[in-house]
Image (spheres, rainbow, N blue to C red):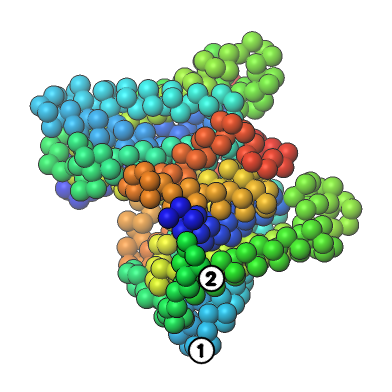
């Protein structure tokens, strides 16, 4: 029973982690709270849905659709809503306002395109359930976990091993110094938005596959949880976001199983407060100062 | 005086002005909250429960404000040690916890909400409350306490070194702001006549944040202008009917690019 709950929690948590990594990446390079990231996640889910409906080439192609759709959207948002404010040397709160505006636009556009109700996500799997001793997992659960963990591993390799990854880390350490060392900071920021949003899009499709439904409002809860996870993991820490996401997923599933299920949506913030009391800079402190 | 519809619009504008002022005060001391909706919920539920028990609105409203202010003290305590984005997300979490609490708290209706609230909110009182809030915020700038808040906003280490008590000033700012949100909540409950937890969700707190940042966080009249513009804009955007949130969102992006420091700039000290 407990092992089963842990498995379910890890699966839920892996999608949380993908979204939270996006918040951390963007916060890392821009010190920006991107309040439309939940909507990017939602658009990614719909992009995956559209691909799944047009060409039924299986779940991998649907995930790829979400990745591309959300990634492109992330770059567009950076170009339209954030870069112009940076160019004008604006107040650091102004980009948050424009991210709220962008989120409203995305929500209404998707409502107009797909309706305000939940839209069924076509089943991509024959529902085979595998019994592995004490736990049983369905083929879709295996797929979701495999994709989520593979994405995180790919991100880890990219950030740790490639020159572009180093450039992203340098930019989040200090934007001015990175720029003076010859890094094209604007390009790196755009790349970061693309990666962060693509991961959010993958998460959107995975959540769609898991619940067999997507809706224009699915991003709202995910957004608040993603922000809580970012603090739990440590501001701007990619690995912190991974750990925090998994921790929250497991914690939520266990709290529903053993505590009161109706308080599930507050669990993320309860966990956040407990972690911050013990470790004010989160589990994996990066030394980034969020105070300004 | 005004038609019923416009009177109701004016009351909601006034409530939002109060919400804007509720965030302006802590922001003047550099404390940014994304959880003002939570304080509003506390004021709304407290006052609604009291008037339903037969208490007069004149007692219920201050009671709601007081309870919200107490909650502000409790949430404000960690604000003594954390700032910036940490505080924003912590207060966001507070707002969500309050929402989930009222969603599950059966004595105040739980998920079905609290209905049958008497229509006790009257426009003149809302206007007076707004005028008072703006007046206090305006006069605060010239006071010792207000200047202490501005000093903390600029640099709290330097402010503390100048002998300003960070504890007193920050807690005062947070509690005063929370109390104002409580008043807004009390007016709201007795105007909407039906409240449920989801009316005080994150979007309420985010809108409050918009009023201040869009109007001008450094000017006491800024949140008022921001609240009026943000509240009335969707009303006037009815011409674009179905796409009004799209236009509204796009206008927010444009406004943020056009005037990143808000519509009104900081007034200079004389």
Viewer can see residue A271: yes
Which residue is at the front of the view, B169 or B147?
B169
Determine whether, in the image, residue A144 is placed left or right of residue A86. left
- The x, y position of residue B187, in whole percent, is 25, 35
Q: Which mark is residue B45?
A: none
Determine whether, in the image, residue B184 is placed left or right of residue B259. left
Q: Is residue B32 above or below residue B207?
A: above
Q: Residue at x 48, y 47 (%)?
A: A251
Query: Quick one: quadrant of the N terminus of chain A?
Result: bottom left
Determine whether, in the image, residue A47 is placed left or right of residue A189. left
Q: Mark 2, chain letter?
A: A
Classed neighbour count for the residue bearing mark 1: other residues with Cα under 10 Å, few (<14), some (14–19), many (≥20) = few
Secondary structure state at the residue bearing disc 1: loop
Classed neighbour count for the residue bearing mark 2: other residues with Cα under 10 Å, few (<14), some (14–19), many (≥20) = some
- The x, y position of residue B10, in whole percent, is 27, 43
Q: CA distance from mark 2 to mark 1?
A: 23 Å
Q: Which mark is residue A142?
A: 2
Q: Mark 1, chain letter?
A: A
Determine whether, in the image, residue B83 is placed left or right of residue B245. right
Q: Which mark is residue A55?
A: 1
Q: Earlier in the sequence, mark 2 or mark 1?
A: 1
- The x, y position of residue A96, in whole percent, is 56, 49
Which residue is at the front of the view, A59 or B235?
A59
Quadrant in the picture for residue B51 = top left
Q: Residue at x 47, y 32 (%)?
A: B24
């Amino acid at each position: 029973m407990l092992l089963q709950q842990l498995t379910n929690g890890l699966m839920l948590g892996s999608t949380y982690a993908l979204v939270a990594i996006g918040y951390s990446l963007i916060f890392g390079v821009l010190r920006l709270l991107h309040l439309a990231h939940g909507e990017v996640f939602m658009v990614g889910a719909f992009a995956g849905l559209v691909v799944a409906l047009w060409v039924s080439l299986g779940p991998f192609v649907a995930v790829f659709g979400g990745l591309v759709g959300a990634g492109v959207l992330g770059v567009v948002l950076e170009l339209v809503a954030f870069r112009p404010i940076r160019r004008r040397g604006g107040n650091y709160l102004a980009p948050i306002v424009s991210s709220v505006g962008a989120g409203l636009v995305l929500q209404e556009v998707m409502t107009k395109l797909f309706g305000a109700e939940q839209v069924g996500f076509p089943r991509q799997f024959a529902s085979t359930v595998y019994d592995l001793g004490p736990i049983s997992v369905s083929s879709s659960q295996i797929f979701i976990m495999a994709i989520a963990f593979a994405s995180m591993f790919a991100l880890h390799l990219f950030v740790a091993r490639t020159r572009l990854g180093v450039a992203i880390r340098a930019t989040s350490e200090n934007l001015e110094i990175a720029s003076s060392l010859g890094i094209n900071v604007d390009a790196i920021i755009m790349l970061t938005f693309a990666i962060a949003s693509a991961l959010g899009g993958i998460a959107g499709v995975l959540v769609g596959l898991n619940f067999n439904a997507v809706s224009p409002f699915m991003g709202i809860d995910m957004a608040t949880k993603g922000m809580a996870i970012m603090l739990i993991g440590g501001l701007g820490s990619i690995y912190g976001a991974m750990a925090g996401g998994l921790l929250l997923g497991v914690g939520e599933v266990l709290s529903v199983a053993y505590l009161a299920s109706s308080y599930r949506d507050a669990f993320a913030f309860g966990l956040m407060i407990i972690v911050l009391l013990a470790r004010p800079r989160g589990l994996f402190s990066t030394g980034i100062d969020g105070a300004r | 005086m005004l038609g019923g519809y416009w009177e109701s619009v004016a009351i909601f504008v006034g409530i939002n002005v109060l919400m804007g002022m509720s965030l302006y005060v802590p922001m003047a001391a550099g404390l940014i909250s994304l959880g003002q909706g939570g304080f509003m919920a506390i004021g709304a539920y407290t006052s609604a429960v009291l008037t339903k028990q037969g208490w007069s609105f004149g007692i219920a409203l201050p009671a709601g404000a007081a309870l919200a202010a107490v909650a502000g003290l409790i949430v404000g305590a960690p604000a003594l040690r954390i700032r910036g984005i940490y505080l924003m997300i912590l207060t966001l979490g507070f707002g969500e916890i309050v929402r989930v609490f009222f969603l599950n708290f059966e004595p105040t209706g739980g998920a079905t909400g609290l209905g049958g609230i008497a229509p006790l909110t009257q426009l003149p009182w809302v206007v007076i409350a707004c005028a008072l809030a703006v007046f206090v915020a305006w006069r605060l700038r010239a006071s010792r306490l207000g200047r202490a808040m501005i000093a903390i906003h600029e640099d709290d280490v330097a402010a503390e070194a100048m002998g300003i008590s960070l504890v007193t000033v920050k807690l005062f700012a947070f509690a005063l702001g929370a109390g104002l949100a409580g008043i807004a909540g009390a007016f709201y409950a007795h105007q909407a006549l039906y409240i449920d937890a989801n009316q005080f969700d994150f979007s309420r707190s985010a809108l409050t944040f918009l009023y201040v940042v869009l109007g001008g966080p450094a000017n006491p009249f800024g949140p008022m202008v921001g609240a009026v513009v943000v509240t009335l804009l969707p009303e006037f955007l009815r011409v674009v009917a179905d796409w009004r949130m799209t236009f509204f969102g796009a206008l927010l992006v444009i406004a943020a690019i056009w005037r990143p420091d808000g519509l009104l700039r900081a007034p200079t000290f004389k």
